[in-house]
């Protein structure tokens, strides 16, 4: 199950307090102040884990707290600092302010971290407050509270090639043909209700990631058919593969619909490198290239034209920006 939105609450550790303490040694009845400082509270980080591909863990746990710092002690001993807390998130996670929508971080690279909440400083012990006129201060500082924040997480899948098409255009069938992904396949619209990723082999030591995105419908950029939720995943794809049903009564109109929805959502998507493939070639129906230009004619059932399409996609990826 792909969970691509979550909201979490983070609390960094509070700093430990400084202490009031005085030296107590034999033959030194009035030792000076030796109260130690409190330890620092733990920070909270978000860290990219390439093994994750969903925000599902945050459905069950939404509150995270880092340990606080320990209080200081005598003999000028500083309290132990709280350990930093690292929360794993999948690549492609965008961190936003839940109310303003401001983007705080875009986490895409494995191992990348984002300091989300900073731990509080430890307070000073009374050893810091001695003066010539007050050699036995009964003063200390409490620890500073750690930061507390709510964050909205949004996952946008990272893929080299994004499959774009109307419902039932054959996207899931193609992905299952060329990769080890096994999306649900059936002969009715909206079989795919969440994106699927598959690794496609393009030859020895050559492969790329293909994303099967749920079918777009007219009005998707306004949220129809959960369009907005799925259109965001296209943002991170390097190459677009438009899959047009060759049995459609008007393939050109289908293409216009897809381009319009992408353009209304983000005009920059129309500038991405692209290929147009006609699906279901085994049914022996194809529009005239003069009226509707296309790059490939394929059948995911028989495999016709699929190897050529994969080679063309791989070639296009070599010249496409990362």
Image (cartoon, rainbow, N blue to C red):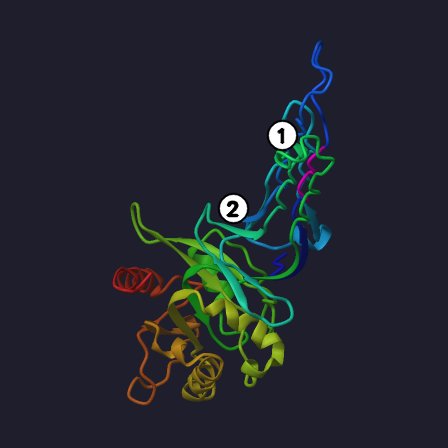
* Crowdedness near tag 2: few (<14), some (14–19) or many (≥20) residues, C-alpha within 10 Å: some
Looking at the image, is 296 positioned above or below residue 206?
below
* C-alpha separation, residue under disc 2 versus residue under disc 1: 34 Å
Residue 156 in sight: no
Instruction: Give the magenta-colored segment's residue range.
Output: 14-19
Q: Which residue is drawn at 68% across and 43% down?
A: 143
- Find residue 306 and report its image quarter: bottom left
- Find residue 125 and report its image quarter: top right
**Pointer 2 residue:** 49
Looking at the image, is 256 positioned above or below residue 60?
below
Q: Which residue is drawn at 65% across and 22% down?
A: 75
Q: Where is residue 142 in the image (x, y as percent from the top left)?
A: 71, 43
Q: Which residue is drawn at 72% across and 27% down?
A: 21
Assign the C terminus to one quadrant of the image. bottom left
- Mark on residue 239? none
**Pointer 1 residue:** 78
Observer-nearest of 133 and 314 = 133
Observer-nearest of 190 and 89 = 89
* Crowdedness near tag 1: few (<14), some (14–19) or many (≥20) residues, C-alpha within 10 Å: many
Observer-nearest of 108 and 212 = 108
**Mark 2 or 1: the one toward you:** 1
Q: Position of residue 270 (x, y in %)?
A: 38, 79
Is 173 magenta? The answer is no
Q: Residue at x 28, y 88 (%)?
A: 290
- Is 187 positioned to the left or the right of 165 in the image? right
Observer-nearest of 23 and 239 = 23
Residue 192 in sight: yes
Q: Where is residue 64 in the image (x, y as percent from the top left)?
A: 68, 48
Q: Position of residue 109 (x, y in %)?
A: 43, 51
């Amino acid at each position: 199950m792909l969970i691509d939105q979550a909201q979490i609450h983070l609390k960094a550790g509070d700093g430990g307090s400084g202490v009031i303490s005085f030296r107590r040694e034999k033959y030194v009845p009035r030792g000076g102040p030796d109260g130690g400082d409190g330890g620092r509270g733990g920070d909270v980080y978000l860290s990219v884990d390439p093994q994750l591909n969903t925000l599902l863990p945050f459905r069950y746990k939404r509150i995270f707290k880092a340990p606080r710092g320990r209080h200081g002690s005598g003999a000028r001993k500083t309290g132990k600092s709280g350990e930093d807390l690292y929360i794993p998130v999948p690549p492609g996670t965008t961190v936003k302010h839940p109310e303003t929508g401001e983007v705080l971080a875009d986490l895409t690279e494995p191992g990348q971290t984002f300091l989300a909440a900073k731990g509080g400083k430890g307070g000073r012990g009374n050893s810091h407050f001695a003066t010539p006129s007050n050699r036995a201060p009964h003063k200390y500082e409490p620890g500073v509270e750690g930061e507390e924040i709510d964050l909205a997480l949004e996952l946008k899948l990272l893929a080299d090639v994004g499959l774009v098409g109307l419902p039932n255009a054959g996207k899931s069938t193609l992905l299952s043909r060329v990769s080890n992904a096994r999306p649900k396949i059936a002969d009715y619209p909206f079989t795919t209700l969440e994106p699927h990723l598959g690794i496609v082999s393009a030859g020895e030591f050559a492969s790329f990631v293909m994303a099967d995105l749920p079918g777009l419908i007219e009005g998707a950029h306004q949220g129809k058919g959960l369009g907005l939720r799925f259109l965001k995943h296209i943002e991170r794809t390097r190459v677009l593969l438009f899959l047009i049903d060759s049995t459609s009564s008007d393939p050109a109109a289908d293409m216009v619909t897809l381009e319009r929805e992408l353009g209304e959502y983000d005009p920059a998507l129309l500038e991405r490198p692209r290929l147009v493939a006609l699906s279901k070639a085994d049914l022996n129906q194809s529009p005239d290239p003069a009226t509707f230009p296309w790059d490939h004619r394929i059948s995911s059932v028989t495999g016709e034209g699929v190897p050529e399409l994969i080679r063309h996609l791989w070639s296009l990826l070599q010249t496409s920006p990362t």
